[in-house]
Amino acid sequence: MPRGHPVRAAEVVPTGAGAVRAEDAFDTAAVATWLRENTSEPDTLRGVPTVEQFSGGASNLTYLLRWPDRELILRRPPAGTKAKGAHDMAREFGIQRDLAPVFPLVPTMVGYCADPSVIGTEFYVMERLEGLILRQDLPAGVGLDAETDRERLCQAFTDALVALHTAPVSESGLAALDRGPGYVERQVGGWSARYARARTPDVGDFAGTIAWLAAHRPDDQPHTMIHNDFRFDNLVLAAAQPTRVIGVLDWELATVGDPLMDVGSAMAYWAQADDPAPIQAIRLQPTNAPGMWTRDQVWTAYGDRRGMVISGADRRFYELFGTFRLAGIAQQIYYRAFHGQTSNPAARMMGEFVRVLEARCEELLE
């Protein structure tokens, strides 16, 4: 999900964390006590940890807990009005825990707390994954300077997505997430309604996009596990070999459904070199750099790996839906800033994000 202004090119997890915003503070001692009482290895969690907050986190909030001998990551929902079904920590925790045996690119879960008396909200804690996370631009000197390295990076991105879509869901216990046929129809209707509920008077209504999507829905592809927010700043790369993916983060929106909807959502973030200036201005990942693939190259490589022929008409639908859905996610975040429920600058900038994405949808419609 959009996380705010991408000011860092690359970060070793979890650099990018800093002082905790006053509105997002919590009782650190209470968390430490709960962890010692409810998780293994309590001896590594003695005392009260230092806490830093990731500077993005406009949706769920993410913190670094640092003890002398251990570092953990805590995830919790924000304060304020939330969209129905959003910010479900138990679900996000359970998906990663259950997916690990069939898709090892998930962080190791430590514990989930449903008791709001501990810090005022539910939360979960996971092990820190150490590696490289790419932000807006490719950094120099980390092994991605050559165009061949960047091609391998794009292949690794695609391979990780294919690995998720081919993971045996029936062996993970997550098949119950599948609500059966009609996933595409439910998603188009659901996100149209969510956007309408979250719309503020300073953004567009996406009426043409919503009508076109409703009229051009393809039949569902066979359902697989899907991430629904697959992009470079949710991938952890091996620091010594940054063309290798070692982890996938942020499973808030994951479910079982049409995998091409997942590809389309990933392509909504994929700003390539020839995209117009407004798209470049909101770019969150370095997909416009020389040697990085175009969206068509990603689609083709994905189809080749899956043994699928994906038509241009289908690509158009899935990319348009992914762009509209991304605008809906951003608008839900912006709604909180518009109504004074957060002072997070990442949330305040989302209104412009939505306006640029509406123009992108209109471009795809033309």
Image (cartoon, rainbow, N blue to C red):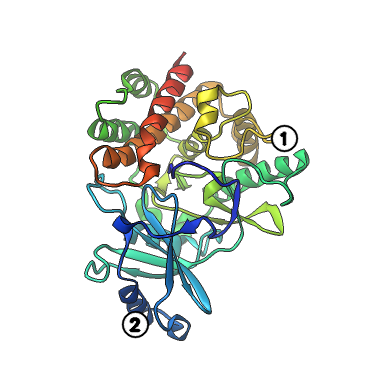
Picture coordinates of residue 309 (x, y %)? Answer: 59, 30
SS label for mark 1: loop
> Where does the N terminus fall, quadrant-wise?
top left
Give amino acid for label 1: Gly
Q: Quadrant of residue 192?
A: top left
| Residue 189 to residue 133: above or below | above
In this image, 361 relative to 235: left or right? left
Q: Nearer the viewer, residue 5 or 176?
A: 5
Q: Which residue is mark 1?
A: 291
Judged from this view, the residue extending furthest toward the top is 366
Residue drawn at x 52%, y 30% is 281
* Residue 217 relative to residue 363: left or right: left
Q: Is residue 57 above or below residue 365?
A: below
Q: Give yes or no for contact between labels 2 and 1 (Cβ–Cβ under 8 Å).
A: no
Give whichever of discs 2 and 1 has the lower sequence position: 2
Provide the secondary structure element on which disc 2 rests. helix
Q: Which residue is mark 2?
A: 37
Q: CA distance from mark 2 to mark 1?
A: 50 Å
Which residue appears at 37% of the width and 65% of the height?
A: 124
Between 323 and 130, which is closer to the camera in this rendering?
130
Q: Amino acid at mark 2?
A: Glu
Give the side of residue 58 with respect to residue 312, left or right. left
The reply to whether residue 76 is visible in this rendering is: yes
Q: Is residue 321 left or right of residue 122?
A: right
Mark number for residue 239? Answer: none
- Residue 117 lies, with reference to residue 151, above or below; the image says below
Locate residue 150, reporting x and y percent. 71, 41
